[in-house]
Amino acid sequence: MSDLTADAVATGHPGTAPADGNPAAPGGGRTVATAVPRSLVERLAAGVTATGEPSVVETVAPLTGERLAGLPLSTPADVEVAFQLARRAQPAWAALPVRRRAAVLLRFHDLLLKRQDEVLDLVQAETGKARLHAFEEVLAVAMAARHYGRAAQGYLKDRRRGGALPVLTHTVEARRPKGVIGHISPWNYPLELCVGDLLPAFAAGNAVVNKPDTQTALTGLWARELLIEAGLPADLWQVVLGDGPVIGPAVVEHADYVSFTGSTRTGREVAQRAAARLVGASLELGGKNAMLVLSDADLEAAAAGAVRACFSSAGQLCISIERLLVHRSVADRFLELFVARTKALRLGGGLAYGADMGSLVSSRQLDTTTRHVDEAVKAGATVLTGGRARPDLGPYFYEPTVLDGVTPEMAVCGEETFGPVVAVYRFDTEEEAVAAANSTPYGLNSSVWTRDLRRGRAVAARLRTGTVNVNEAYAAAYGSVAAPMGGMGDSGLGRRHGADGILRFTEAQTVSTQRVMPIAPSFGLDDRQFAAVMTGGLRALKALRFK
């Protein structure tokens, strides 16, 4: 943190805005204190499983640096209690028809849209992001609720499969709930990455013990209240809070399946702990995502898309773009458009629409962002715009930053910044661009811009990322909730959304019923005769093109 930023946090008196910096958005008139009153915090905190006299952790509003909430901390013993409560509630829930469970999701969808202003205030208060970017969370969760509310019955229905012997063997593939899901969710998208992943788990008949990041726990607790209002049994969703190294392992230790979103380093630990217990896990981890601007791209559209891709939620988005790969023939014009749009972004923390970008969430994120930029500049990179903190706006604001001349030895080249920073690289051939995009252990998201949609899809097929957007930043693929979303390589295991997003929370069970005769010598056949009959039968089935 710079001295100026530190002074602003300590004194509560922001510094002076730089004359050439990003403009400040008009204030919203309401404060975090009025939008998140103590009475609301106390009501939501009552949803945490924390027995006895729990210790309390104080959270801070990133927009102002002021105290936001005091929340109870759970202990490993509390985690065990939470799993006990969830296990008692789960069988009755699983026994309900799928349509009854799915109806809860559809009612939640309506309540969420009706009362979205409440949760938008919470998301902004806890993360510091702009209201439009908070609304993206509402949008994503509503889409998931609608999708699984309508499609869960189809995903989970029994499916007839080919039996061992046609006609004589009746085989069905059934889907059974895992039991109690351990869900560990991060701070950056506290609504979408919390409840958005839990909706299919509930629809599949599971209970959940959820450990959200403490900084953004109020948002998840609010969503829990809304789901209960929509008809979810209260004990089915347990919330525990605490330090990740303390509470996280306890969640994994008791879970029948683990769902985790967070860093690659922590994801490896979660995977190892889950594997030791022979339980499954899905992991959405880090990324160093690339956007490819091909020579025939609509540069106005690509520049506008790059702003969304790089600076939504101040870059604190797993699928945001941190590497811009631009064809050399259009690089100058693209950068002229992109930098101008970036300089014009309005920064602000008002609890209202109007700001184009909000704050980073913490001093840790600010420190990482500052270090990546400062070290790159010292090593020879050029700042085309941004490159500095904005304590005049709040303690953790940092201007949207575009870097040129980044080289492989710079940390910002390969490490995930998770802040409003993007590096620009030029390429001459499509092969060079694809190789550069794939030159990372990560493989989460990518973006391709071209006027030739067939060409765009052909390039997409060569990119090693779980999602690819052609002529969009990230929302097209992520918002396609009927299709799977997740990462390759160091970006994780498993998928959310679509069939994968709900079936991961189930066990496949095959039920086969044999009729008329056993699959064994019978009707007077000896072993040799039975083998001869079965051999002839196998040849006939192949000739008849049975699968």
Image: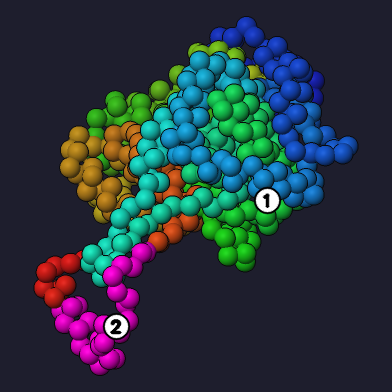
Label 1 crowd bin: few (<14), some (14–19), many (20+), radius 10 Å: many
Q: Which mark is residue 251?
A: 1
Mark 2 residue type: Ser
**Residue depicted at x 76% and y 17%:** 39
SS of the residue under disc 1: helix
In terms of image quadrants, where is residue 78? top right
**Residue depicted at x 75% and y 38%:** 49
Q: Which residues are magenta?
A: 512-539
Q: How is the image coloured?
A: rainbow
Q: Is residue 538 magenta?
A: yes
Residue in front for this viewpoint, 493 or 468: 493
- In screen coordinates, is 204 left or right of 75? left
In the image, residue 544 lies at what x, y percent? 11, 69
Mark 1 residue type: Val
Residue located beneath label 2 in the image: 522
- In screen coordinates, is 535 left or right of 380? left
Residue in front for this viewpoint, 167 or 319: 167
In the image, residue 124 lies at what x, y percent? 60, 23
In the image, residue 62 lies at what x, y percent? 67, 26
Which residue is at the far front?
524
Label 2 crowd bin: few (<14), some (14–19), many (20+), radius 10 Å: few
Q: Please tell me whether residue 109 is drawn above or below residue 380 in the rendered image.
A: above
In the image, residue 233 lies at what x, y percent? 61, 33
**Residue depicted at x 28% and y 53%:** 462
Residue in front for this viewpoint, 409 or 98: 98
Looking at marks 1 and 2 on the same chain, the residue that comes earlier in the sequence is marked by: 1
